[in-house]
Amino acid sequence: MKKLALLVLVFSGIAMSFMHRHLNIPQSAQVSPAQPNILWITCEDMSPHLACYGDKVVKTPNLDQLAAEGIRYTHAYTTAGVCAPSRSAIITGMYQNSIGTQHMRTLQPDPYPHKFSPVKTYSAVIPQDVRCFPEYLRKAGYYTTNNEKQDYQFLPPVTVWDESSPKAHWRNRSSRSDGTGKPFFSVFNLMITHESQIWMREKESLLVRPEDIIVPAYYPDTKTVRHDIARHLSNVMRMDSITGAIIKQLKDDGLYDNTIIFFYSDHGDGLPFVKREVYDRGLRVPLIVRIPEKFRVKGSKPKGSTDDQLISFVDLAPTVLSLANIPLPDYLQGQAFLGEKKAATPRKYSFAGRDRMDMPLDRVRAIGDGRYKYYRNFMPEKPYYQDIEFRLSIPMMREILQLRDAGKLNATQMMWFRKTKSAEELYDTQTDQNEFTNLAGNPAYKARLAELRGQMDSWLKKVGDKAAVPEAEMLKQMWNGGSEPPQTAEPRVVKSGNTVSIRCATPGASIGYILKHGSDQANSWHVYSGEKLMLQSGDSLRVVAQRIGYLPSKEVKLKD
């Protein structure tokens, strides 16, 4: 116990050092709003490897404590087994295949990223009525911050975040005249568990002994495999310490009991045959929510409880809006699972998809009811394994391929390398957690197959599937038949006396403005909601508009 206490103390010191070095944390700023603050702590590429979820190898005291004070969800699923499509669903509350963000990925530093995409980089044009949900929070008076990863498959308008940078933090509200006293929605994205950190942190000490690892049946049991899994789990333990440091800041600021905290991962482990997959191991993630007593509604589960209801990550956006008591837009495809606007009935099915992954193309759709999973392979002629260059940096991936080529993998380990796929797959994840035994052809499961097949048909008909056409054709449709993205129309500023109103001719455009009074130094964009703005002598106004996926409008400037 003394050793564990010392280990936790050391981790806490490392975490605080990491936070101040890498997240640029400002000093304490105490504000206690009447509305709930909402904090998201998200990590990358992690299945439920937490002690509170039953993992016997890792030590995660901070997240265990959060679970002891909150609700631990056991059936939370992402909509994709990879970050960008998953994050697009999270930020919009919409399935990625319904809005054209299904391919991994669309935005690249190189406009023609030949290693990672068969088409040039693009910002997906999503339906005109769809917004990034933090924009609704801003309209309702919230201060929104994102630190720092976005990766939504499109560039967000200036109206989404008050801050989105390595320095973004709820504490920065006090440095802005329009931020003090506001409730906040703050997101911290922790990269330490990302797939890349398996090789990039090679020089760091292991916190998990490789000999303690339980090697999944789909991997060969080798020294390299054990080491890489131990590295990933060591990163999980360090991530827990960083999480504890963020929570400590809330407590130091006197905000802990005014803040609803979410913790989750954006998809499953960043390991071979897990990340990028739509099997449960690629989609099922930890989700913990702590709600202070003052914000709990009637019928809420007690602290320290577990909740087995099915959660899809399209449900996160409506749930946050529900907890903030903000009306839910009609277009949302998710449903709230907490708050005043909680759905009357729990979700019955979760849905997911797999499409292009860097260069390799595939199209798979999945549906699960919490036990049974059904997969429809639209390209059964393609193999399960995809040769993805980025993944080859993982030592165990290279070794697995060497063993495959040498004929040293057993039948189970070779399942990933099957040359073709079944058109349909059905698994009982309760008795077959690795999803090895396809029940689609088993007469005993005929009724279950028909049910999930029918629900898949209904879902695709309801939400649509942008991957039904080639990506280049989809892009042409997004760009109204052109070869480049359209530009949002220049906003029109109408002055009447000492007030102004703003309009934009582009349907679905969000409008942002900066109003400077006299010599003040305001430089943050606000969301325009149709109100009349007071413009007095000496004031200046800057206005920009953008529909998601379009180029921003030209900036309009007005000085009184």
Image: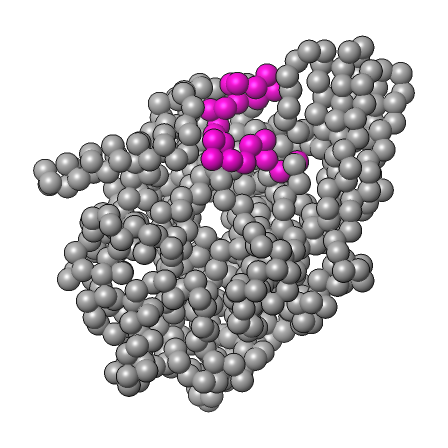
Q: Residue at x 43, y 23 (%)?
A: 26
Query: Of 260 and 178, which appears nearest the observer?
Result: 178
Does 394 appear above or below 385? above
Q: Relative to residue 494, is residue 99 drawn left or right?
A: left
Does 237 appear above or below 420? above
- Rendered location of residue 182, percent (x, y): 56, 23
Q: Is residue 162 magenta?
A: yes
Residue farthest to the right, as pictured: 496
SS assignment for the magenta stretch, majority: loop
Q: Relative to residue 229, is residue 388 drawn left or right?
A: right
* Part of the protein shown in magenta: 159-179
Q: Residue at x 19, y 67 (%)?
A: 223
Q: Is residue 377 magenta?
A: no
- Residue 139 appearing in the image: yes
Residue 124 quadrant: bottom right
Q: Residue at x 64, y 64 (%)?
A: 119
- Rendered location of residue 45, percent (x, y): 40, 55
